[in-house]
Amino acid sequence: MTTNPHIITLQEAQEMTYAYQDAIQFQGQTISSAIDIDAITQLINQSGCTGIRIYFGLTSSNKLAPVIVGYDENDLDMANGIILNRGKYCPINCHPSPLIQV
């Protein structure tokens, strides 16, 4: 069984998310965005999609927001296909998580 290089431990995830949440320049910014599985499935089921790329953007109210696009076997964005955003942002839609520092 091969190890997937994208998988990290909870401790690594906490170190990263807590560092972001503690950084003064990001205080009050979005700390997470939830996107439903149906939207993710539609994106990854596009013909030729071999992975996803996550860009970081800003909403009209200057909040951090992920912009998610599929990419093909040539590592090219499928920009004419499905592009995702409009997640449920935290703060506002926050739920208990070991990745949120209290």
Image (spheres, grey):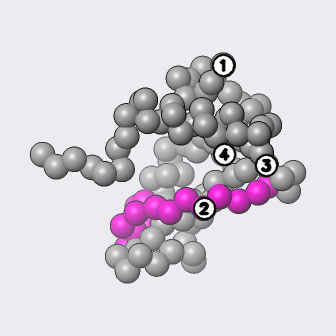
> Please, is residue 55 above or below residue 78 in the view?
above
Q: Residues within 10 Å of mark 3 (few under 14, many from 20)?
A: some
> Please, is residue 65 above or below residue 12 in the view?
below
Q: Quadrant of residue 66?
A: bottom right
* Sequence-first tag of 1 and 2: 2
| Direction right: furthest residue | 61
Q: Which mark is residue 87?
A: 4
Are discs 1 and 2 less than 8 Å apart at CB?
Answer: no
Residue 51 image point, x, y percent: 40, 63
* Sequence-first tag of 1 and 3: 3
Residue 14 image point, x, y percent: 51, 31
The residue indicated by pointer 2 is 55
Residue kind at label 2, given as amino acid type:
Tyr
Residue 22 image point, x, y percent: 68, 34
Distance (Cα) linking label 4 and label 2: 14 Å
The residue indicated by pointer 3 is 63
The residue indicated by pointer 1 is 102
Distance (Cα) linking label 1 and label 3: 21 Å
Residue kind at label 4, given as amino acid type:
Gly
Viewer-proximal residue among 28 and 92: 28
Residue kind at label 3, given as amino acid type:
Lys
Distance (Cα) linking label 1 and label 4: 22 Å
Image position of 1 (left or right of 49): left
Label 1 vs label 2, nearer the camera? 1
Element on which disc 4 rests: loop
Residue 47 in magenta stretch:
yes
